[in-house]
Image: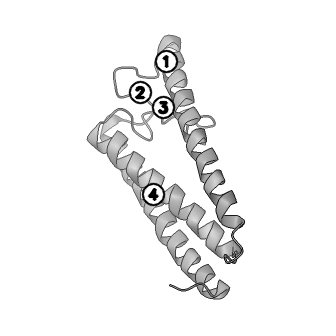
Amino acid sequence: VLHQLLQWHHMATSAGYPADSVENLRFNTLFDGLFHAGTYIFVVLGLVVLWRTAHKSHFRWSGKMLLGTMLMGFGIFNLVEGVINHQLLGIHHVNETVPQDQWIYWDIGFLIWGALMLIGGLALARRGKRESGEPR
């Protein structure tokens, strides 16, 4: 949503390639695409793990557990990406269309959203685990 629809949160906007020219937008779009390609590789690897786990006869599925662990993954990803890319490396920020002194608020909101997904996902996964009878 942030990359394609809102057209912010590009990968290299704070690393010397602001989204102020067609050339810089092409550069950012290339790195956005490389980033997405890398994440798709991890999605496929995750699906392989999920497929193997789903075929174990002793494993009982719970929709809440699946959704909860997916939310946990999204939350962890946003927290790691937000801390490393936004804060430590500063290669880009969530919304660079606002004045620079406001970037931090958008970055903090992104981290809060990631934390909420992680916490909500953890709670949902635990509920699903209890309902499926899995040991803690």
**Rendered view: 98 above or below 69:** above
Q: Earlier in the sequence, mark 1 or mark 3?
A: 3
Residues at marks 2 and 3 touching, judged by CB atoms closer than 8 Å: yes
What residue is rendered at 57% in x and 75% in y? Answer: 125
What residue is rendered at 54% in x and 36% in y? Answer: 38
Label 2: which secondary element: loop
**Rendered view: 75 above or below 84:** below
Which label number is shown at residue 5? none
What residue is rendered at 63% in x and 45% in y? Answer: 44
Direction left: furthest residue: 88
The answer to which of 49 and 12 lies nearer the viewer is 49
Residue at mark 4: 76
Q: Please, what is the three-letter code of the amino acid marked with disc 4?
A: Ile
136 displayed left or right of 101: right
Estimate the spatial distance between the alpha carbons at disc 4 and disc 3, rounded to whole Å. 20 Å
Crowd rating for badge 2 (residues with CA inside 10 Å; few <14, some 14–19, many 20+)? many
Residues at marks 2 and 4 touching, judged by CB atoms closer than 8 Å: no
Q: Earlier in the sequence, mark 4 or mark 3?
A: 3
Which label number is shown at residue 12? 2
Q: How many discs appear?
A: 4
The answer to which of 85 and 47 lies nearer the viewer is 47
**Rendered view: 39 above or below 75:** above
**Mark in the foreground, 1 or 4:** 4
Q: Earlier in the sequence, mark 2 or mark 4?
A: 2
Residue at mark 3: 10
What residue is rendered at 66% in x and 75% in y? Answer: 64
Crowd rating for badge 3 (residues with CA inside 10 Å; few <14, some 14–19, many 20+)? many
Estimate the spatial distance between the alpha carbons at disc 2 and disc 4, rounded to whole Å. 21 Å
Residue at mark 1: 27
